[in-house]
Image (cartoon, rainbow, N blue to C red):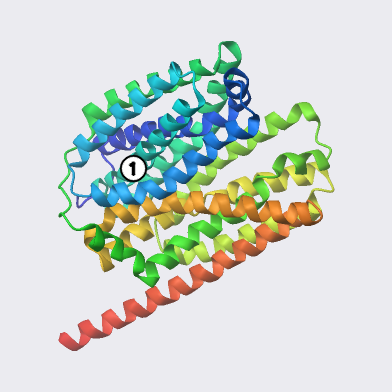
Amino acid sequence: MDTIELTKRHWLLILTLALLTFVLGTSEFVIVGILTDISSSLHITNSKAGTLVSAFAITFAVATPLVMSATSHFPKRKWMLFLIGAFIILNALCVISSSYILLLGLRMMTAIVTGVLISLAMIVASETMPIAKRGLAISFVFGGFTLANVVGVPIGTVIADWYDWNATFLLTTLLGVVAFSASFFVLPDLQRQARSSMRDQFSLLTHPRILMAFFIPSLGFGATYAVFTYLVPILKQMEAPSGSISLILFGYGFISIFSNILAGKIASHNAIGRLRFVFIVQAIVLISLYWTTNNLIFGLVNIGLMSLMAILLTTSTQLYLIDLAGIYQPKATGLAASLMPVASNVGIAFGSALGGIVYHQGDLMNVTWVGGLVAISASLLTFLSHRLDQKQKDTTSRQKLRTS
């Protein structure tokens, strides 16, 4: 692939992978919109129904790296098609589920399938595209998730309102069938990764540079979710009309589509260098909410900017982790590809918990300061990573000069 232009085949593969992440994202996130329906139908409390969300996230975060390490040598095309088939079966079983325990087990198994498929989609996008276009390709693949929040989740929630929550899983099952059909005809055969032991794979996680790269997106997502988790109370404090809150949340999701597009552009050149300043701007945007929410219009504009900044880090950090693995442990690129989704879940959990502590200890709007400080921490870590990258490049250049 010596050309930097994307062919029709490239675009077909990108759109197929984006369709897959859209389906996976819809299945993962739609549960939030139907929790009350599930609790009412299964005669459980809302808090117990909420464990369907937390169990999914925890299983996703813990199991994905383990499974990616154990299956790194599997042929990617066959393995992805098998997993999509498993996704279809698991969602079909949710359609007929009438037990909380059964539904919980199915959701946890779906979390494993989802995490591995997302990681594989990132690897395929990275390995099949021209180097200069990897950022664009991966931003489109991540875009499937963004679209799931904006389009898939509302549709799934409406279907639950019209029929019942089981019908929502019928939707995700049918979407899975569409994704399987597209993937069957479009996914290429890729070279297998050399087989290596779990110990060799997880030795990647002992390298300080990998750990630093992991915590960059963790802190980035944590900064956003320290505030976003409490966005509805913030909107109410801004005296936003109660009937407009759903529309505002939809607008927030819609703006994040453009954030995803910008993420690809940032990743196209000197990604980590640019990301240093992205986090500084994110910190300014989050902290400024402390004052702008005194005015509804200014506050809504500021929230729109918050959405625009929210996922600018995704593509850059995904590629950064894969590239670092290529330097320090080439046999563990599959594990590296799984770290960004895991980091995002860690960041969401961390940010939500930190925001909750601050919220319950004092004024609601203090969460904006916390989010800003976390973003500054992400920027400092990115500055350090970038500086170490430059030192390594300088050392490599000097070594080449000596040998030549």
User: Image quadrant of residue 245?
Assistant: top right
Q: Residue at x 41, y 29 (%)?
A: 106
Q: Residue at x 68, y 55 (%)?
A: 286
Q: Is residue 133 visible?
A: no
**Residue 285 or 101: which is nearer the viewer?**
101
**Residue 41 or 209: which is nearer the viewer?**
41
Farthest-out residue, top: 163
Q: From the top left corner, tell me how far across and down residue 264 is, in percent.
A: 43, 49
Say left or right for 269 vs 330.
Answer: right
Say left or right for 250 vs 5.
Answer: right
- Vertical placement of residue 285 versus 172, above or below: below
Q: Residue at x 36, y 41 (%)?
A: 118
Q: Is residue 311 visible?
A: yes
User: Image quadrant of residue 165?
Assistant: top right
Say left or right for 202 vs 158.
Answer: left
Q: Secondary structure at mark 1?
A: helix
**Residue 211 or 375: which is nearer the viewer?**
211
Farthest-out residue, bottom: 402
* Quadrant in which the C terminus appears: bottom left
Q: Dot 1: within a 10 Å radius of its alpha carbon, few (fewer than 14), some, or many (20 or more) residues? A: many
- Vertical placement of residue 74 versus 50, above or below: below
Say left or right for 7 vs 138.
Answer: left
Q: From the top left corner, tell me how far across and down residue 68 is, in percent.
A: 29, 48
Disc 1 marks which residue?
A: 116
